[in-house]
Image: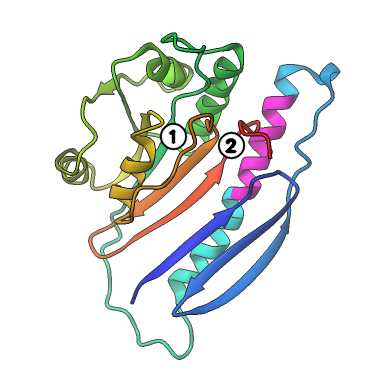
Amino acid sequence: MERSIVVTLPRCGQAKAECKHAGRRWSWLASGVDGRASQSDGDVQRRSTFLRCFCVQFMVAVVCSVHWNVGFADDKPEPARSTAATTFIVVRHAERDGNQDSLTSAGVERAKLLGELGKLLNVSTIYSTNTQRTKGTVKPLTEILKLEVQLYDKANPAWIDKLRKQHDDGVVLIVGHSNTTGVIAGLLAAQEPFPIEHDEYDALFIIKADESRTSFVRLKYGPASITP
């Protein structure tokens, strides 16, 4: 039976999470954290606010996951599954400075926020392409966790299969590009490639996979990168 979890939280205010199960739909409304911060509060408070906002989003996703995992009264019991599971986090590199292989000041701030999130989510392995903008995006996290970046070249099905075999547990962060992030997330989630806009830098995919099942959520983190 195909099941999917979809969480769409474009702003850090009122959040709506939808969990689809066998053609039926339930909705939960969660009061998010106000994402607005005054200029005088400084970068620390803004990052803290966005971090709290992400935590609210993540908690809503967890609520959906709990409802999804326990099933419903009219469902047949599912066979016992292995407890070992791998969590993949897939993001695009942070804001790029035009056509330069470097980050803007906003990109540097997003990279710092990703470092805080990565620490919160207990990232154990980091993958990046060999570019300054992707390596710069994970630099704060590598410094926090003292992890070395694993470089990859081509994001294709063969590489995804290799990842699955190499990582049967833990939390794996993968940083890609506008034309690869959605592809990587889609392959890991056994879905079609997820669309990523050319100026979209705040998408964050979480895919959890074990031997028998894969679940995924698409979230946003940090300041919105696309004007509504």
Residue at x 27% of width, y 68% of height: 81
| Picture layout, residue 137 above or below residue 86 | above
The reply to whether the magenta stretch includes residue 168 is no
- The residue that appears at 50% across and 23% down in the rendered structure is 94
Q: Amino acid at mark 2?
A: Tyr
Q: Position of residue 56 (x, y in %)?
A: 65, 48
Residue 158: image tag: none
Look at the numbered disc 1 and give the secondary structure of its residue: strand
Q: Would you say residue 48 sits in the magenta stretch? A: yes
Q: Is residue 165 above or below residue 19?
A: above
Residue density around tag 2, few if under 14, some if 14–19, many if 20 or more, within 10 Å: many
Q: Quadrant of the N terminus?
A: bottom left
Position in image of residue 188 (x %, y %): 30, 49
**In the picture provided, is 58 more to the left or to the right than 15?**
left
Give the residues in magenta.
46-57
Residue 61, x across and y down, in percent: 55, 56
Q: Is residue 155 left or right of residue 51?
A: left
Is residue 67 visible in the rendered image? The answer is no
Q: Main secondary structure of the magenta part?
A: helix
Q: Residue placed at 71% from the left, 20% from the top?
A: 44
The image's colouring method is rainbow
Q: Which residue is mark 1?
A: 91
Counting from the top left corner in percent of width and height, residue 29 is at: 71, 63
Disc 1 + disc 2, Cβ < 8 Å: yes
Which numbered disc flags the more N-terminal residue, 1 or 2? 1
Packing grade of label 1 (10 A; few <14, some 14-19, many >=20) is many
**Mark 1: amino acid:** Val
Quadrant of res 182: top left
Nearer to the camera, 117 or 24: 24
**Helix, strand or loop at mark 2:** loop
Q: Image height check: is 187 above or below 52?
A: below
Residue picked out by circle 2: 221
